[in-house]
Amino acid sequence: MTDYLPHPPVEDIALPAVLTALGDETRLAIIAILASNGERAMTCGQFLQFGSKTAISYHVAKLREAGIIHVRPEGTKRLLTLRRGDLESRFPGFLDTVIASTAATLPYDSLGMPEAAQFAGE
Amino acid sequence: MTDYLPHPPVEDIALPAVLTALGDETRLAIIAILASNGERAMTCGQFLQFGSKTAISYHVAKLREAGIIHVRPEGTKRLLTLRRGDLESRFPGFLDTVIASTAATLPYDSLGMPEAAQFAGE
DNA sequence: CTTAATGTTCAATGATCCTTGAACTAATGA
DNA sequence: TCATTAGTTCAAGGATCATTGAACATTAAG
């Protein structure tokens, strides 16, 4: 429950900021994969296919600051989760349509995603 | 029917580009007002409340290049319309949720919009 | 204690963004 | 013809963006 990193409260999540944050292929891919992974949290390291450690850290911060994901430190890792409920309550239907559109549009299976199988094991 | 200005065909409308184009308060306001105006076309001049002629021209070009609006020259004016159908067929539900979220979020009534009344007359 | 694993921070760089004002084009109207 | 209307183009400026490598911090594991 303790909030190590700054996250905007639901009522402060701003649409332009959310749209800007999602208007980047790397971040959109991260969101799509997070969404395809159900409620399970993921770590930054699982996105290194999309860029360097520094780059992922940068994009994850952007998504967090926009209010799209929640980041919780656990050991040396960061556990990332989509703020599905918060986004749904603030912009009903929005995230779902973005996810659906992304799945139909982005070719991130070209990056090695048969059906999110590699995120199963720990 | 003649297409004076370059518009991306439906199948080339890209989600990241659309999100980026909408991730700007000025452009989001333009879209929201266009949407609130039904099927009626509007001109660049009707958005001068949001910036200079140059700025509006710039933003309108961005929206057109992203595939969000259609621009048709008529005399010295440009008639702007939302590409509702195209966007709906490519990203089902997306535009509607953005419009709804914008209406609930952006304070563009603070710019003199009681209920889109000033767009009625010609 | 030492090493490895996981991210963050910083400074630098090149690219892109948004705005501005001046000059311009094209169409309309007196 | 001359002026007006509506918008575009261009160059310049400052701001923000996304990436990189090097150094660092923190936690975990041997």
Image (cartoon, coloured by chain):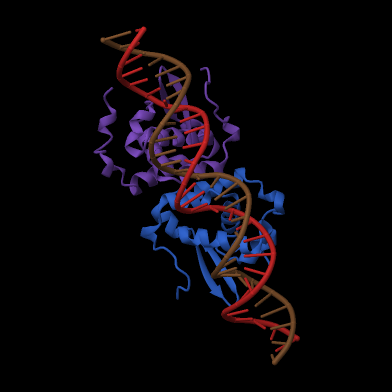
Chain colours: A blue, B purple, C brown, D red
Give x and y (percent) for residue B82.
44, 31
Give x and y (percent) for residue A116.
66, 57
Residue A1 visible to an observer of this rendering? no
The residue that appears at 66% across and 46% down in the rendered structure is A107
Asked if D1 appears above or below B41 in the picture, the reply is above
The residue that appears at 52% across and 51% down in the rendered structure is A22
Q: Quadrant of residue B35?
A: top left
Asked if B49 appears above or below B76 in the picture, the reply is below
The residue that appears at 37% across and 40% down in the rendered structure is B29
The quadrant of the image that shows the N terminus of chain A is bottom left
Q: Quadrant of residue B36?
A: top left
Give x and y (percent) for residue B62.
49, 36
Nearer to me, B45 or B66: B45
Q: How many marks?
A: 0
The residue that appears at 55% across and 65% down in the rendered structure is A80
Question: In the image, is B42 to the left or to the right of B2?
Answer: left
Nearer to me, B3 or A108: B3
Residue B20 visible to an observer of this rendering? yes
Give x and y (percent) for residue C20.
38, 39
Asked if A87 appears above or below B1 in the picture, the reply is below
Asked if B110 appears above or below B78 in the picture, the reply is below
Question: In the image, is B115 to the left or to the right of C25?
Answer: left
The quadrant of the image that shows the C terminus of chain A is bottom right
